[in-house]
Amino acid sequence: MHLLLQLSLAASALASAIPAKRLSVANSTIGPYVAPGTEYLSLPDPEFPIKFTQRHSSFANPGYISAVQPLNVQDLSTMVKSFNKKNLRYMATGGGHGISTGFARVQNAIDIDLSKFNTIDLDVEKNLVTVGAANVLADFADSYTGPERKSVTTGNSPCVSAIGATLGAGVGPMQGLHGLMIDSLRSVEMVTPGGDVVTASQTENTDLFWAVRGAGAHFGIVTRATYAVYDATNRGEHVNADFRFDSDAQLGLLNLLKDWDSDEVFPREMAVSVTFSYDHVAKMPTISVSAYYFGSYEAARPYLQKLVDLKPIHWRNETLGWNGMTQAAGFGQTFAKACVRGRYTTHFSAGIRQTDPDTWASVLAKFTDWSAARPWFKGSIILQRYNAKVTQQVPAEDRGAYPGEILGRWSTYDGPNHDVEVREFYQPLRDAIYRTSGFASPQVYVNYAHGDESPEAWYGPSLSRLRLLKQKYDPQNRFGPGFPVSGKPYIIRGQPY
Ligand SMILES: Cc1cc2nc3c(=O)[nH]c(=O)nc-3n(C[C@H](O)[C@H](O)[C@H](O)COP(=O)(O)OP(=O)(O)OC[C@H]3O[C@@H](n4cnc5c(N)ncnc54)[C@H](O)[C@@H]3O)c2cc1C
Ligand SMILES: *[C@@H]1O[C@H](CO)[C@@H](O)[C@H](O)[C@H]1NC(C)=O
Ligand SMILES: *[C@@H]1O[C@H](CO)[C@@H](O)[C@H](O)[C@H]1NC(C)=O
């Protein structure tokens, strides 16, 4: 405590000596609290889009008046304490991929951009990797691909921040082998909502360590995180396969997914992502499937054959390093789209643990009709099937706040000016999916959620403990605006749970 106070004074004394070249708002709100060399500016500023991490989506964005890039954890601690004292609103930006209606509540705020936390450290002896808040999943995936032949468990998208994904749980294709990213998390360095620098792990600050694994955006700012690494399966190679189908394959595919609902039948080495969309040029619905198999081609073949049997219009498969999976998937097309900044996109999601082909057939029929009548509509419905067995075997006391079990199934849409129309269309579809989800009440992976669901849907049985910890660590409620732990439960219209 004493040490932090000294650092904070030193930082402000030094800060007044740096030549200022910034505008008035940033001068008065940020200038006095930063160490020499810290970049900060008032918005708008032409340097903002160049030097600061921009958001993936412009949907319901936070409104910033200024932005700052803390240089290190002490600098960040000083800032948080000073901003708290002056009651200034702020929000951290990691990879900028979060999307929530709740972010729009953050206005006249300071963007705390974590770009400077970008170091990766390997501990080959202890099988650990430590990444910073700015490192994205692609950096994380590439961290151990040298001669060591080790592997981490990661998501399916390159530009999301590794820590950002982990704060919700970190789902991904390798989940069947090594569990969620939170299951690999060993410790974090973080600045608490009060501005203190702490380490949280299974042995230190254990309640914070529990909370960051599922509700991480609520409990301060994580600057660095350490994860376990594993020996790479199949010498680090995996099979990546992509299929394109027309709607004739739909029923067969839904029935196959139903067969694959069981984690005993669907192999833990495998992951599947199915995308339903509408082709406005050909005027027909299309289905694409990306399959990953973390094993040999021979082992993958019987499972790929089940997709081949559904008569794809086109398909391909290749064997490559597992860390190349995001670049290869979607016939090599999804990668670029996932990293674009400033798209107008959001999602409506549902966690489901079983496939109800009738529900999906009806949802997809409505989706096709609706899309066909709206040439501006570029949304899709994505079903992600990851094997959850390893995660379910993690003992409850080791798990963290993530309620677990949820399979990500989500939907996206692009294009402004249609928010109300899109919402009115999607909400009843989502309700229909919730009803046959296999869960007693709506469940959704917090990092895929829209923001209009309930805390019960995001945090499940962890909610009461989270609320107590929130009182203890963030009584002013400065953190976690996207998915607040307080709030009303979401009631499905006509069908209260
Ligand atoms: C194209 C796309 C692909 C995705 N793929 C996956 C996937 O494969 N697996 C998966 O699990 N999720 C995935 N997600 C969801 C993703 O995990 C969330 O959007 C996550 O919140 C993004 O974190 P970020 O740091 O990139 O985003 P940001 O928008 O920077 O942050 C999101 C929220 O977390 C807070 N935050 C960010 N960094 C920190 C930090 N270091 N400490 C404390 N709070 C922080 C922010 O203040 C904000 O409230 C995907 C999202 C998109 C858009
Ligand atoms: C910001 O502060 C610097 C030095 O403190 C000063 O020279 C500059 O004029 C200030 N800018 C504005 C817009 O107030
Ligand atoms: C699938 O992979 C195998 C093994 O590499 C290869 O022989 C076959 O041609 C591939 N099939 C397609 C359609 O890509």
Image (cartoon, helix red, strand yellow):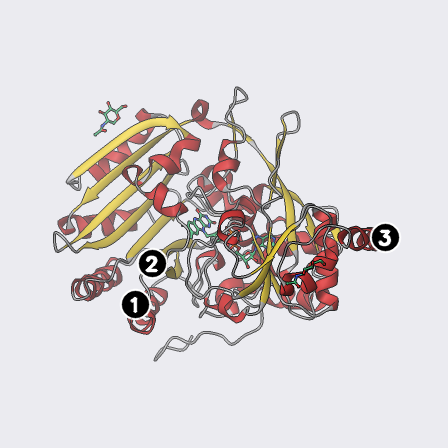
Residues 158 and 342: in front is 342
Residue 262 can be seen in this image? no
Viewer-proximal residue, 10 or 143?
10
Query: Mark 3 or mark 2: which comes first in sequence?
Result: 3
The Cα atoms of the two marked residues, 3 and 2, are separated by: 49 Å
* Amino acid bearing label 2: Ser
Left or right: 361 in relation to 175: left
Task: Measuring from the top left, give residue 106's x and y in whole percent.
Answer: 55, 68
Identify the mark nearer the N-term, 1 or 2.
2
Q: Secondary structure at mark 1?
A: helix
Secondary structure beneath label 3: helix
Q: Nearer the viewer, mark 1 or mark 2?
A: 2
Residue at the image point whose x is 33% and y is 65% from the top? 416
- What is the number of the mark on residue 429? 1
Graded by Cα atoms within 10 Å as few (under 14), some (14 to 19) or many (20 or more), the crowding at tag 2 reads many
Q: Which mark is residue 411?
A: 2
**Circle 3: residue type:** Gln
Of all residues shown, which one is farthest toward the top?
147
- Asked whether 77 or 207 is in front, the reply is 77
Residue 289 vs 486, above or below: the answer is above
Q: Position of residue 141 (x, y in %)?
A: 49, 35
Question: How far apart are labels 1 and 2 at the CA level?
Answer: 10 Å
Instruction: Name the mark on residue 6.
Output: 3
Q: Quadrant of the C terminus?
A: bottom left
Tell me whether circle 3 and circle 1 mark residues in contact (CB < 8 Å).
Answer: no
Q: Amino acid at mark 1?
A: Leu
Spatial distance from mark 3 to mark 1, Cα to Cα? Answer: 56 Å
Residue contact between numbered discs 3 and 2, judged by CB atoms under 8 Å: no
Q: Does 51 sit above or below residue 105?
A: above
